[in-house]
Image (spheres, rainbow, N blue to C red):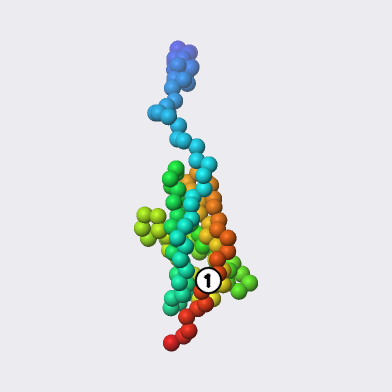
């Protein structure tokens, strides 16, 4: 039995230097995503928000619209509709909106408040 113990200990010591290796580490990403081409449009049933979000280093992880509705705020996840384009439908009575984007490295950017268009009249 002792022989197996010494063999096991020897293997542990010999293999402890082996690691994943596999190449160079990923470059550090200290830059938040860019947010541009913001569009707000009153539509039946709400306010449509379109935005372009890009992150060249690690890619975009999440995009959230923060809508001010009356005296409350609502976080509305935005959906990717094409390469860098995101969209969400906000409540019709949204007064203001901010957009928060986070990349896969955890860097965040948030816009200032943007006034939403008034709701469409009922038909």
Q: Nearer the viewer, residue 106 or 36?
A: 36
Residue 29, horizontal then vertical, whole percent: 50, 40
Residue 49, horizontal then vertical, whole percent: 46, 66
Q: Which of 14 and 81 is in front in this view?
A: 81
Q: How many labels does the image show?
A: 1
Q: What element carries label 1?
A: loop
Q: Is residue 5 visible?
A: no
Q: Nearer the viewer, residue 62 or 2?
A: 62
Residue wearing tag 1: 116
The residue at 47%/62% (across/down) is: 38
Q: Can residue 10 be seen in this view?
A: yes
Residue 70, horizontal then vertical, whole percent: 60, 74
The residue at 51%/62% (across/down) is: 65
- Within the image, what quadrant is residue 45 found in? bottom left
Identify the residue at the far right of this view: 71
The residue at 53%/57% (across/down) is: 100
The residue at 46%/15% (across/down) is: 10
Query: Quarter of the image containing the C terminus?
Result: bottom left
In this rendering, is residue 53 above or below 24? below
């Amino acid at each position: 039995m002792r022989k197996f113990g010494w063999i096991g200990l020897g293997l542990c010591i010999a293999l402890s230097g082996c690691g994943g290796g596999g190449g160079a580490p990923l470059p550090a990403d200290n830059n938040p995503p860019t947010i541009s081409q913001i569009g707000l449009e009153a539509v039946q049933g709400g306010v449509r928000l379109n935005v372009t979000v890009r992150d060249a280093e690690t890619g975009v992880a999440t995009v959230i619209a923060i809508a001010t509705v009356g005296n409350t705020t609502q976080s509305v996840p935005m959906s990717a509709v094409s390469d860098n384009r995101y969209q969400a439908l906000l409540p019709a009575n949204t007064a203001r909106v901010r957009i928060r984007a986070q990349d896969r490295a955890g860097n965040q950017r948030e816009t200032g408040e943007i006034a939403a268009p008034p709701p469409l009249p009922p038909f």
